[in-house]
Image (cartoon, rainbow, N blue to C red):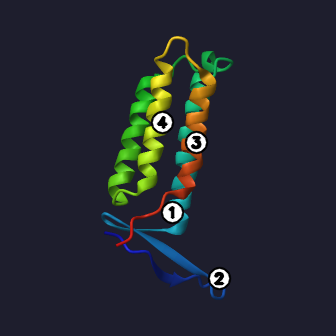
């Protein structure tokens, strides 16, 4: 199980500490993980655009099912790497609910969008699991 700990002091700023995030094979520093969160935000946001009734025809070469599956696999890998933070459960549940909405007839884009945005908002709350 990971432990949040202070690993080093930034030499550029007095008394500014960098927190390392422990994971399965070592640690990420806070900048690395913040950059990753930005990328994950972007990947989740694309789910909205790919199914937006006003925009979806702009992406004819995107295989939505494949994109969705790949994103869920990446999130599952993150889950394992960070020792199963509880936020991942809620994120994947919301994304799966959104995916199921795409299979409904009629498709309720507003419900779909809400689930995606709710999952999106949880990304910044992902934390490592501490002992």
Ranked by sequence position, the earlier of labels 2 and 4 is: 2
Ranked by sequence position, the earlier of labels 4 and 1 is: 1
Q: CA distance from mark 1 to mark 2?
A: 18 Å
In the image as oriented, which residue stretches furthest toward the right? 54
Query: Residue at image x 57%, y 44%?
Result: 120
Residue 113 percent coordinates (x, y): 61, 31
- The label shown at residue 56 is none
Q: Pointer 3 and pointer 4: residues touching (CB < 8 Å)?
A: no
Ranked by sequence position, the earlier of labels 1 and 2 is: 2
List the residue tagged with mark 3.
118
State whether residue 58 is above or below residue 72. above
Residue 42 vs residue 52, the one in the foreground:
52
Query: Residue at image x 38%, y 74%?
Result: 3
Q: CA distance from mark 3 to mark 4?
A: 9 Å
Q: CA distance from mark 2 to mark 4?
A: 40 Å
Side of 64 relative to 49 (left or right)? left
User: Of discs 1 and 2, which sits in the foreground?
Assistant: 1
Q: Secondary structure at mark 3?
A: helix
Q: Secondary structure at mark 4?
A: helix
Residue 65 percent coordinates (x, y): 43, 24
Residue 105 vs residue 6, the one in the foreground:
105
Q: Pointer 1 and pointer 2: residues touching (CB < 8 Å)?
A: no
- The label shown at residue 95 is 4
List the residue tagged with mark 1.
32
User: Of discs 3 and 1, which sits in the foreground?
Assistant: 3
Q: Secondary structure at mark 1?
A: helix
Query: Residue at image x 46%, y 81%?
Result: 7
């Amino acid at each position: 199980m990971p432990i949040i700990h202070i690993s080093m002091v930034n030499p550029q700023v007095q008394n500014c500490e960098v927190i390392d995030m422990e994971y399965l094979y070592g640690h990420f520093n806070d900048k690395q993980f913040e950059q990753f969160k930005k990328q994950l935000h972007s990947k989740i946001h694309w789910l909205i655009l790919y199914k937006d009734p006003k925009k979806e025809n702009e992406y004819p070469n995107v295989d939505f099912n494949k994109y969705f599956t790949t994103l869920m696999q990446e999130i599952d890998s993150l889950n394992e790497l960070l020792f199963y933070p509880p936020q991942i459960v809620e994120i994947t549940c919301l994304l799966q609910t959104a995916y199921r909405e795409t299979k409904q007839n009629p498709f309720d884009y507003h419900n779909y969008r809400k689930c995606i945005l709710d999952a999106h908002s949880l990304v910044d709350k992902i934390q490592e699991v501490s002992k």
